[in-house]
Image: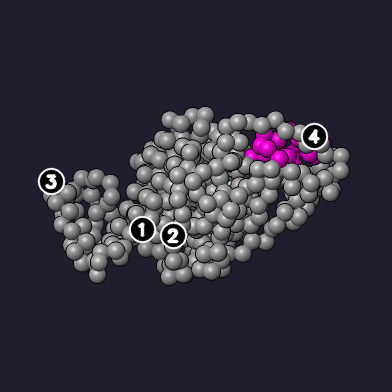
Amino acid sequence: MPVIRTISKVAKQALLSTPGCGCQPVTVAVRNISFSPRQVTSDASFHSVSFSETDHPKVLITGGLGQLGVGLAKLLRKRFGKNNVILSDIRKPPSNVFHSGPFIYSDILDYKNLREIVVNNRITWLVHYSALLSAVGEANVALARSVNITGLHNILDIAAEHGLRLFVPSTIGAFGPSSPRNPTPDLCVQRPRTIYGVSKVHAELMGEYYHHRYGLDFRCLRYPGIISADSMPGGGTTDYAVQIFHDAIKKAKFECNLRPDSRLPMMYIDDCLRATLEVMEAPADALSMRTYNINAMSFTPEELAQELQKQMPELEVTYDIDPVRQAIADSWPMNFDDSNARKDWGWKHDYDLPELVQTMLNYFGVETRMASAN
Ligand SMILES: NC(=O)C1=CN([C@@H]2O[C@H](COP(=O)(O)OP(=O)(O)OC[C@H]3O[C@@H](n4cnc5c(N)ncnc54)[C@H](O)[C@@H]3O)[C@@H](O)[C@H]2O)C=CC1
Ligand SMILES: CC(=O)[C@H](N)C(=O)O
């Protein structure tokens, strides 16, 4: 078993050369030692795509047809050029998305297909958005485990083999009932009670392990619940904060599936996508950690409804609690401490609750006027 012997020899040397007490991270760059974290045949060799900081990155976004991917592709294409950002998913793209830039089929559970896409397109940045979210994950644990954990393993191995910069989002859902909830710092107890949360803690730890062990340029932000106007959420606990706008506009009525006092951290999508670009562009030496909380605002359904009612006094909100979502919300952070992101790479949000509500209503107002003009 020549490959395995070589690996253990290199690993041993790396461990032995660790200075001091051995508590320093062992950084072994994949490209320097020609082995991959995945078991490979002895004649395989890996070449990282050399990415000079003056070049534009070539970006692949997985799970790109969900709530966040299309918006991120738009932002990155503005910055790096249309053809340098490839959206991928297992679903069929709507025609406006298909015609707005490169789109490719990619199932993250198909390792060979993923590797082919990375190689053929000379990908240098990978944004890994594929996932099953909290409520959908509880309804289908086996699939969530497979997509969120097995899929992540494929992504990590491919990113390490090809020297990619890898972004994987985590979430407020990576914390649980034994975490401090108000506020929740970056480093504290993480014992989530959902398969979604467990898979995200796994992603944080595996990404950081690959960073220390193989030199993978892993970057991770824990997103709050994200609110967007032109894309719908994919089955999470914070979805109510998007749905309320749609129902307010359509029917002036909204039935909320969380208790009126369920406080959760939230963020407008533009802040979330900008944070993602900013942390991806941050110089490595600015990052004292590889996983950061980011925050903007925290509110309850009642507070969101009151802010909306300032502009739409006719809006009626009732409550019909979904016990699964409520139990999840009760175990998540109420306020998020993102002081490390602010200190290390200058994170600053633009939208608080009043600006969020105004921006969402403006968006729908424009749409309504356009619809009635047609
Ligand atoms: N939207 C939010 O409020 C938050 C999102 N995040 C994270 O951000 C990322 C993106 O979130 P959203 O866009 O909201 O998710 P979403 O649920 O809207 O979209 C996920 C996408 O993954 C795709 N997918 C599922 N199985 C796949 C597979 N086998 N191969 C390839 N793609 C597959 C789905 O088709 C879907 O388009 C996720 O990792 C999520 O955990 C984190 C915190 C908050
Ligand atoms: C906060 C999240 O991760 C997501 N929106 C969910 O509610 O599952």
Q: Which residue is mark 3?
A: 1
Sequence-earlier tag: 3 or 4: 3
Instruction: Give the image location of residue 252, x and y in percent.
Output: 82, 36
Please report the bounds of the magenta region as a residue range: 239-260
Relative to 140, say whether 12 is above or below.
below
Ligand 1 within 8 Å of the CB at mark 2: no
Q: Residue at x 45, y 44 (%)?
A: 191
Q: Nearer the viewer, mark 3 or mark 1?
A: 1
Q: Which residue is mark 4?
A: 253
Q: Which residue is mark 2?
A: 290
Task: Report, in whole angstroms, how far the alpha carbon at label 3 lies from the one at label 1.
Answer: 26 Å
Q: Residues within 10 Å of mark 3 (few under 14, many from 20)?
A: few
Task: Report, in whole angstroms, how far the alpha carbon at label 1 lies from the one at label 4.
Answer: 48 Å
Q: Which residue is mark 1?
A: 211
User: In the rendered structure, which amino acid carries the disc numbered 4?
Assistant: Lys
Query: Which quadrant: the C terminus?
Result: top right
